Image (cartoon, grey):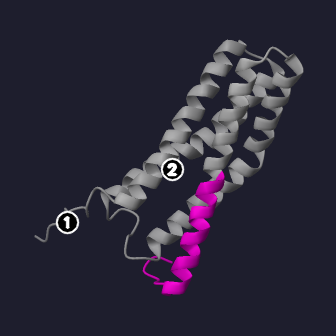
Amino acid sequence: MIGLKISHKTKKWLLIFHLLFAAIMLGNMTAFLIFSITAASVSDKELIQTCYQAMHILSKTSLRASTIGMTVTGILLSVWTKWGLFSYYWIIAKEGLTVLCIFLNFWGMYTWTLQAISKTNDLFFVKTELWTGIIIQILSLVLMYIISVIKPWGKRVSTTRLS
């Protein structure tokens, strides 16, 4: 797979899917933010419970699917184009942010929304974790968009020496 080059048309389609998955993930996190604000600002226990249930459903479905899709298409774009997986600092930064998003999406959002629904832990602590995760996730996604457009850091200098 590495070293395989794809046509310009295939690259464009792969990039479209990558951006769609990233947009779906950002949309999910926007929904999480709206549900969290709603849950924090109302006193209706049923509405609060419904907000956490909706977030939990998203964490098990759309959020996971978009995370997988974004990661897979990002890896394919890296290995099938001139960019490579570790050739540019900006790609390495995006990879680090992607690992953070994977952790937050597959473990954090799922666990915190499940705890909020079942009230297994201190709800204040769970809400704080959830809010923190949502904010970190949104900031990470926005930063990935910015890095992708600006490409702020250049190519890594090869450290291989010929003796």
Element carrying mark 2? helix
Between 12 and 114, the one nearer to me in the picture: 12
- The answer to whether 42 appears left or right of 1 in the picture is right
- Which percent across, then down, holds residue 28? 68, 45
Between 32 and 64, the one nearer to me in the picture: 32
**C-alpha gap between disc 1 and disc 2:** 27 Å
Whether residue 106 is visible to the viewer of this picture, yes or no, is: no
Taking the magenta stretch, the answer to whether it contains residue 97 is no
- Which percent across, then down, holds residue 93? 38, 51
Q: Residue at x 50, y 87 (%)?
A: 7
- Going from N to C along the chain, the mark reached first, 1 or 2, is 2
Amino acid type indicated by mark 1: Thr
**Does 115 sit above or below residue 2?**
above
- The answer to whether 14 appears left or right of 118 in the picture is left
Mark 2 neighbour class, 10 Å CA radius: few under 14, some 14 to 19, many 20 or more:
many
Mark 1 neighbour class, 10 Å CA radius: few under 14, some 14 to 19, many 20 or more:
few
Taking the magenta stretch, the answer to whether it contains residue 5 is yes
- The answer to whether 3 appears left or right of 66 in the picture is left
- Which percent across, then down, holds residue 132? 56, 27
Residue assigned mark 2: 98
Residue assigned mark 1: 160
Q: Nearer the viewer, mark 1 or mark 2?
A: 2
Element carrying mark 1? loop
Residue contact at pointers 1 and 2, CB within 8 angstroms: no
Q: Which residues are magenta?
A: 1-24
Q: Residue at x 64, y 34 (%)?
A: 108
Predominant SS along the magenta part: helix
Q: Residue at x 55, y 39 (%)?
A: 137
**Does 66 sit above or below residue 162?**
above
- Which percent across, then down, holds residue 142? 49, 47
Q: Residue at x 19, y 62 (%)?
A: 159
